[in-house]
Amino acid sequence: MRPSESLVDSVAMFEIGLDGPDAETYVSMRGVDEFSTVAENIAELSKMGSVVRVTYLLTDVNYEKAREMPKLCSDLGVNMLRLQRILKVGRFLGNIDKFDLSEEEIRRAVMETREEAERYRIDLRTPMVAPIPYGTVHIYPEGDVVTRRNSEEIGMEVIGNLHEGSMGEFWDSTLADAHKDFVLSQNRV
């Protein structure tokens, strides 16, 4: 599908996943040969005056090529890039062994990409490499609502899924209090 004026006029910002700087990497990530189509649509949206941010999911398959993404974004007329890490929750857990990266691999990909982003004047957003702070609530695109209820817990907990129920069904007073304490904390970074 090609971008249309009516689509561009009705959307404030497009965030488009492009998990490889070339067709080979993209196919190894997505399993389909659509790199050219996605890249062309990104360039077209940019030419039409849309705000576009490219999202690059860092995995064991493609993290070493992340540093090539700022140049590609610049070539496509896009000045925003977000590196995303695989989230170790919900539906992503099924593929975690195949794709997961160490903190050091993520850090290295972020640092190398940051240098290139500065060179090409790309606004780069990067993943946290520290654990998600307790008291926070995250809602992921697949609908999982994730939190850490206290500072002692190492992992995160899926408390529900917005595709399967409402927030009111799984938001409880313990979670609300933990969230409030974190937000109001003097030590929050």
Image (tube, rainbow, N blue to C red):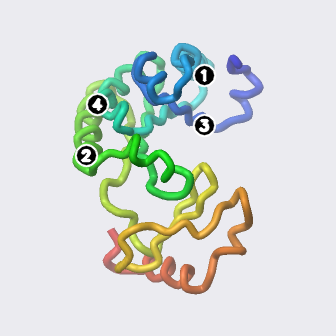
* Other residues around mark 4 within 10 Å, as few (<14) / some (14–19) / many (≥20): some
Mark positioned earlier in the residue sequence (3 or 1): 3
Amino acid type at image mark 1: Leu
Q: For residue 152, what is the image quadrant?
A: bottom left
Judge left or right: residue 8 versus residue 126. Answer: right
Provide the residue designation for mark 3. Answer: 13
Provide the residue designation for mark 2. Answer: 107
Residue 61 position in % (x across, y down): 37, 32
Could you say which disc has been placed on residue 64 in the image? 4
Amino acid type at image mark 2: Arg
Q: For residue 79, what is the image quadrant?
A: top left
Judge left or right: residue 103 versus residue 168. Answer: left
Amino acid type at image mark 4: Glu
Q: Nearer the viewer, mark 4 or mark 1?
A: 4
Mark positioned earlier in the residue sequence (4 or 1): 1
* Other residues around mark 2 within 10 Å, as few (<14) / some (14–19) / many (≥20): some
Residue 176 position in % (x across, y down): 56, 80
- As measured in the structure, the alpha-carbon distance from the residue carrying label 3 to the one carrying label 2 is 27 Å
- As measured in the structure, the alpha-carbon distance from the residue carrying label 4 to the one carrying label 1 is 27 Å
Which residue is rendered at x = 50% and y = 77% of the image? 179
Which residue is rendered at x = 37% and y = 49% of the image? 127
Disc 2 on helix, strand or loop? helix
Amino acid type at image mark 3: Met
